[in-house]
Image: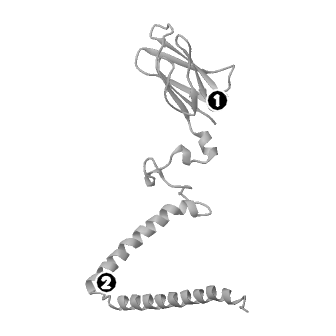
């Protein structure tokens, strides 16, 4: 009669054998590492190099802490401002997508519109169709009813005017005219600043 438990002994024996082999390998690796470390010799020149590296690192570390202080301090020191100064931020490091939604909403929205009404550039703008000769409607992603609009013609001999749409709260009406006052298709830039 065979023992039903005998079949279960082999996995246990195999596991113990693996553990013994792993312990032996670990002991060998530890011994080799200790021998390699004892073979390292520090020369006076290497110690001087290490000292120079440390001396250069301390002022840089202190400078980094000074830069971070406005962000980590519970309240700013007199004369300091919360946050980093612009000269400490690399150009292009802060983009609109990295801003919190509340700050993103406060960013200026703008549109560059061609004389045909096509949108050539913009932020927070969804369209700029031409309604008629010299008349455009620039539509933004959110309401601009409480915002101020600024518009500038592209090129000379042109006049532009912007006003809030009485029909759509997310739109600004822009009219463009030639130097003589007649409505004329002109390219323009419009910017909306909201409180």
Callout 1: few (<14), some (14-19), or many (20+) C-alpha neighbours within 10 Å? Answer: many
Image: 169 above or below 156: below
Pick the quarter of the image with the C terminus. top right
Q: Residue furthest front?
A: 1
Q: Residue at the spot x=43%, y=87% of the render?
A: 29
Image coords of residue 177 (percent x, y): 49, 12
Disc 2 marks which residue? 47
Q: Residue at the spot x=55%, y=22% of the render?
A: 128
Look at the image and name its color scheme.
one colour
Camera-side residue of 89 and 130: 130
Q: What element carries label 2?
A: helix
Q: Is disc 2 in contact with disc 1, using a CB cutoff of under 8 Å?
A: no
Q: Does any portion of residue 53 appear in the rendered image?
A: yes
Q: How far apart are marks 2 and 1 (CA)?
A: 65 Å
Label number found at residue 144: 1
Q: Is residue 62 left or right of residue 110?
A: left
Image coords of residue 106 (percent x, y): 60, 40
Q: Is mark 1 on a helix, strand or loop?
A: loop
Camera-side residue of 53 and 39: 39
Q: Residue at the spot x=72%, y=88% of the render?
A: 4
């Amino acid at each position: 009669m065979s023992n039903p438990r005998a079949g279960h002994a082999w996995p246990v024996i195999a596991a113990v054998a693996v553990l013994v082999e792993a312990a032996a390998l670990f002991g060998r690796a530890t011994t080799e590492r200790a021998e390699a470390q004892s073979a390292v010799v520090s020369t006076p020149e290497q110690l001087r190099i290490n000292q120079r590296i440390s001396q250069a690192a301390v002022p840089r570390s202190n400078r980094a802490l000074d830069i971070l202080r406005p962000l980590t301090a519970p309240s700013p020191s007199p004369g300091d401002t919360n946050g980093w100064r612009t000269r400490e931020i690399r150009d292009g490091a802060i983009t609109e997508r990295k801003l919190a939604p509340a700050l993103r909403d406060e960013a200026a929205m703008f549109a560059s519109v061609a004389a045909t009404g096509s949108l050539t550039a913009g932020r927070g703008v969804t369209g700029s169709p031409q309604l008629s000769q010299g008349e455009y409607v620039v539509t933004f992603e959110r309401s601009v009813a409480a915002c101020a609009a600024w518009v500038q013609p592209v090129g000379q001999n042109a006049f532009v005017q912007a006003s809030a749409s009485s029909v759509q709260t997310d739109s600004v009406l822009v009219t463009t005219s030639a130097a003589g006052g007649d409505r004329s298709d002109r390219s323009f830039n419009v910017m909306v600043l909201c409180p």
